[in-house]
Image (cartoon, helix red, strand yellow):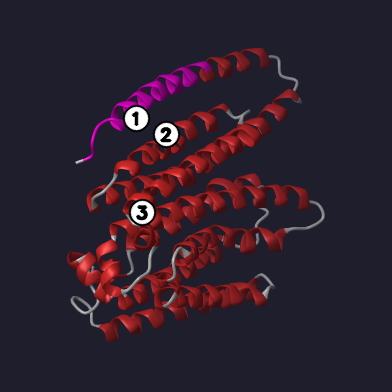
Amino acid sequence: MKILKLIRIQNLLMIAFMQIIFRYGFLKKITENYLSLSDFQFALLVLSTVCIAAAGYIINNIIDQENDAIAKPQSRIVGVSISEAMAYNLYVVFNLIGVGIGFYLSNIIGKPSFATIFILIAALLYIYSTSLKHIVIVGNVVVSIVLSLSLLILGMFDLFPAIHDGNQEQMSKVFSILLDYAIFAFIINLIREIVKDLEDMDGDKASGVNSLAIVLGINKTTKLLFAIALVSIGLFLYYLNQNLLQFDYVLYYALLLIVGPLLYFAIKVVTAKTKAEFHHLSTILKVILFFGIISILVVNYCLTNIYLGVLTQTMQLSNIKIINKIIELKAVLIKTGIFMSLAAYWGVILVGTFITFN
C-alpha cells in the first residue's frame, strides 16, 4: 500500500486507462484492426509507460522530501514510511523495466531507434525533478509534454509501422485526431500544474522552488489562469465549429462535460485564495481531462454511424424507410434528453458561480 501511494497509483491508472480507451475505443475500430502491436504487445507498451511514469513520481518524491514535509506532511512517504535507499532502488527497478520493454517493442516493430524515446522520457523526468521544476513555468511545460507523449506514443508504435500506400491517407487522419487529443491533454494539464503550484506555495517557498505562483503572486497568477482558461474555451469552441459541428452528440457532450466545467473553473479561479479552493479547482481540471479523453468514444460512435449510413444507402432493402424512421425517432428522443440535461446542467453552473466555495 505504501509503494502504491509512492508511485501515485491513481495517476498511473489514469494513464493506462487513457491509452486503453484510445486503443480499443478508437484506433482498433477506426483503422479496421490495421495496427502493428498485438494485444499482448500493447499491454507491454502500457506497462512500459506506467513503469517510467512511476519512476518519475518516485524520484520526484525523493527530491521533494523537504517540500512535502511543509506542504503535505500527512502525505509524505519517503523518509517516513519508505526509506530513501528503498525509494532509490524502486526508482531504478521501474526505469529498467520500462526502458527494457521499450527496447523490446522497438525491435519487434522494426524501429530499434524508437527505444531512445523511453530513455529520453526517463531522463527528462529525472532532470525535471532535480532542476527543471525550479525554473519558472518550464517544469509545468515538461510535465504536460510527458503526459501528451503517453498518447502520441500509441501512434508511433501502433499506427506508424502499419502505414502503407493503401492506408496512408486514413492513418494520417487518425494520427491527426490523436495529435489533437494530445494537445488538449497538454493544455488542461498545464493549467492544472499551475493551479498545483498555487496549492503548494508554502512548501515551494521553503524549498527554494521558483514557481510561477511565487514569482507573480496569487492575484496575478489567478488572473493569468482566468485568461488562459478563456482562451482555451475559445480555441476549443473554434475547433468544435471547424471539425465537429456536424456531430450532434459530440457537440452536446463537449458543451456539457468540457466547456461547462472549464467555464466554471475560469469564474471560480479569479476569487480563489486558499489551499482548499485550489485543490478543488485542481480536481475540476482532472475531471475535465477525464471527460475529454472519454469523448473519443463519442467521436468514434459518430464516425461509425457515418460509415454505417453510407453502407445503408448502398443496400437495397425493402424496409429501409422503416429503419430510418426508427433511427430518426431514437435520435429525437436522445437529443431531447440531452437538451434537457444541458439546460439543467448550465443552470447548476450559473447558480454555482455565485456560491462561495467553502
Seen in the picture, residue 228 relative to 92 is either above or below; the reply is above
Q: List the residue tagged with mark 2.
A: 260
Tell me the amino acid under the disc marked 2: Gly
Q: In which quadrant will I find the C terminus?
A: top left
Farthest residue in the bottom direction?
A: 85
Alpha carbon distance from label 1 to label 2: 7 Å
Name the element at disc 2. helix
Regarding residue 319, the answer to whether it shows in the image is: no
Describe the element under mark 3 as helix, strand or loop: helix
Residue sitting farthest toward the right: 165
Q: Nearer the viewer, mark 3 or mark 2?
A: 3
Do labels 1 and 2 touch, CB within 8 Å? yes
Residue 170: % across, % down: 73, 47
| Residue 128 located left or right of residue 201 | right
Q: Nearer the viewer, residue 188 or 92?
A: 188
What residue is shown at x 61% (from left), y 52% (from top)? Answer: 179
The local secondary structure at tag 1 comes to: helix
| Residue bearing the label numbered 3 | 195
Residue 67 appears left or right of 127: left
Q: Please provide percent x and percent y for residue 348.
A: 32, 27
Residue beneath disc 1: 349
Inspect the magenta stretch and tell me whether residue 4 lies in it.
no
Quadrant of the rendered image containing residue 63? bottom left
Give the magenta-colored segment's residue range.
Answer: 332-357
Question: Few, some or many C-alpha atoms within 10 Å of disc 2 (few <14, some 14-19, many ≥20)?
Answer: many
Classify residue 53 by image quadrant: bottom left
- Front position in the image: 117 or 209: 209
Q: Amino acid at mark 3?
A: Val
Q: CA distance from mark 3 to mark 1?
A: 20 Å
The question of residue 353 being in magenta is answered with: yes
User: Considering only vertical position in the picture, is 329 above or below 203?
Assistant: above
Q: Position of residue 9 (x, y in %)?
A: 33, 63
